[in-house]
Structure formats: structure tokens, C-alpha cells
Amino acid sequence: MQQQLNVSRENFDDWLVPTYAPASFVLVRGEGSWLWDQEGKDYVDFAGGIAVNALGHAHPQVKKTLVEQADKVWHLGNGYTNEPVLRLAKQLIDATFAEKVFFCNSGAEANEAALKLARLYGHKEGGNKSEIIAFKNAFHGRTLFTVTAGGQPKYSEDFAPLPQDITHLPFNDLAAVADHISDRTCAVIVEPIQGEGGVVPADASFLQGLRELCDKHGALLIFDEVQTGVGRTGELYAYQGYGVVPDILTTAKALGGGFPIGAMLTLDKYGVLFQPGTHGTTYGGNPLATAVAGTVLSMINTPEVLNGVQKRHQWFIDGLKRINEQYQVFSEVRGAGLLLGAVMSERFNGQAKQLNTLAAEEGLIALIAGPNVLRFAPSLIISGADIEEGLNRLERAVKRLCA
Ligand SMILES: *Cc1c(COP(=O)(O)O)cnc(C)c1O
């Protein structure tokens, strides 16, 4: 075999399009909720690859599925179906409101499919029914349609001209939606908890109200559960905890536990609007991805794992409270299950990134969600001991931030 090139963090700036500004170290190995860098330094992982590695790194059962499927068939293309994709579709249908599933490779693609389906639905209904209502500070992905639906103009305006007829209203403001929505609205897209926007949960009354307004005006209710899905909130999908059922749900991130996959879930009557040739993607329903996702889903969709998320939630809350009693670094901890946002207090306003960098120096990988929120989205099966060790490392970082 060819000898491998020695590489380092500096090479990122030399060779990669600088769409990211990665940390100063390069991670080379992961196991459970632990990661190691090129120097052999260890890190507790409270980020989970941005809410993706829901069963930690290199879970033996997930790895077994990947290797077994790799021995069978990796890819076929859409002229042929395969066993893993059929099994995964049935699993998702059995576990949710869905009757039809479309597979793709990412969250953005799942939302792209959802928004295109909503437009198609609107055109079939007639009457210039093309308006999409979305929310300020929302995040739905980086394709031109999804980034325009997202509620941060700074991410989309440089790519104008943008897709038309998307209206942004304030999140959790039902009156604003009631004022604006009309029979011209084909869909409302919303995250049950705004993830990138700062870990901001929707009020139950807001989602319930959206459901009623959508029913009244014949608009499709789309829940973007790319970040909240697959056990993250302690329910398989967050809508189940809210008791509000959407017409379309998008899921990705944790679905493959680290293997890229996305899906759009919907009802029969909407799903069949897409016919052969109207939408697709080469890798969608790829047997490697769907085999892995099948194992991930069946492992997470158990009372032990889902109840365990609630238990771990409390451990995090208690530990963060303990740190905060001493240092008053956070004004609030919000979110659900294992999607948590610690909001920086007045004194440390805008310093989430500094704290995150110090945490990494202390051997803890966490996330931020905007300039003012430190975010945690660890493995759903992280051990109590690993949570404690991670929080101890966080405390050391907090102490340095205060110094
Ligand atoms: C991450 C995310 C997306 C985009 O997913 P990609 O896989 O990065 O395309 C969309 N919506 C939400 C809520 C997300 O958190």
C-alpha cells in the first residue's frame, strides 16, 4: 500500500475551501464518548459530531452492521431497491405518523425535498398557493432553498437572487402567524427546538396553534427534526413529546449515527405527489447508509435508551447548576433531553466561543449555538462517569474564563 502523507491542522488552510475554522488540533480516534488527537491527548465528547453520534463513536453493534453490509453490497443506484432501505422505511413508518419515506443524504436535502413537495402540493391545489412561512433565527441547511428558508439573512443574501415567496416571522409568536397566514400559504416550516439559533424550544401552544392554522388554511406543517430527532429529546421525535403531529417531518444527523443519511417522512396523500422523475438523488436509500441507520434506530428506539436520555438530562442540569453556583457564568440552561444550551450570563456576554476553546484545552469537546450559547449534544448513552469527567473539565475552563 502507498505510504500515507503526514498532515496537520495547518494543511486545512492550505488545501480546504475555508468554509469552516476548525479547532487547532486534529482528532484521529474515537470510542464511546471519548476522542483522541494526533498528540494522544484525550477529550470527553459532549458535542457528538453536532448531534450526530447518538451512540457515541465506534459502537460495536453499529460497526458490525456496517462491516456486514460492506461484505454484501454498497451501492446500487435508484434503478434497484434493496433490503436495508425497505426495512428502514418500515421501521420509520411503524415508529411515527409517517406512511411514506423519501431517503437522501443530509438534513438540507431532506428539507429541500420537504419544501419542494410543499410547493408541488400548493400548485396542485391551485390559486397561487406558493407561500412558505418560516421563522427568524431558524436553520434548515445550506442549499439555496433551505438557506433562504432559514431565518438568518446573513447566510443567504450574498447568494441572491434567492427563491421567492418565503416569509419570515418571529419564532414562538402565534399571533404573528395568525395575522399573516392565508390560503396562499402552502407550508409552515419550523424546528420544535431551534438548534443553531441558540437551543430555543418552541412553546407547546405555539406548535399546537400552527397545527390549527395550517389545517384552517390547507397548509402543510413541516417539522424540521434534523437536530431534535432520533431520541435527542428523550422521545424518538420531539413532535411525540409535544403531541402535535406534522404533515412532513425531516430527519438526518443522528439517523445514521455518523454515517451520512437523511429522510423526509410524510403521509401517503402527500408522498405520492412525487412521481418517478420528479425528485431524487443518486445515493438516497443507499444500502450501506440504510443498514447502519436501521441498527441505530432500533437501538435508540427502546424505553431504556429514551428514558436514559431524561436521566442524563438531569445529571447535566445538576452538574451545570453546581458549576454555576460558584461562578455565575450562565444565566439559564435550556433545551430538552440531551440537546442543551447554557446561555452566557451578562458578565460573559458573547463569550461562548472563548469558553468552548478553553474547554477544548481542558480536554472537553462542546459546541456553541450563536455567540452566547454553549451547546451540548452528547451521545445518548454517555455514562454518568463520563458526564462527570466532562463537567469537571468544563469547570476548569469556566474557572479560567473567570480569572
Ligand atoms: C443540521 C441541520 C440542518 C442541516 O443538515 P445538514 O445535514 O447539515 O444538511 C437542517 N436543519 C436543522 C434543524 C439542523 O440542525
Image (tube, rainbow, N blue to C red):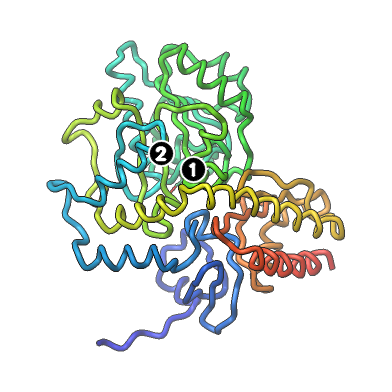
Q: Quadrant of residue 125?
A: top left
Q: Position of residue 22 (x, y in %)?
A: 53, 66
The residue located at (57%, 31%) in the rendering is 242
Q: Position of residue 119 (x, y in %)?
A: 33, 25
Q: Earlier in the sequence, mark 2 or mark 1?
A: 2
Do the CB atoms of the residues marked 2 and 1 lie less than 8 Å apart?
yes
Q: As rendered, which of 153 and 145 lies closer to the eye?
A: 145
Mark 2 surroundings: few (<14), some (14-19) or many (≥20) residues within 10 A: some
Read off the residue under disc 1: 236
Which circle marks residue 95 in the picture?
2
The residue located at (45%, 76%) in the rendering is 11
Say what secondary structure mark 2 lies in. helix
Q: Is residue 74 above or below residue 173?
A: below
Q: Is residue 146 above or below residue 121?
A: below
- Quarter that holds the C terminus: bottom right
Which circle marks residue 20 in the picture?
none
The residue located at (30%, 33%) in the rendering is 100
Q: Quadrant of residue 383?
A: bottom right
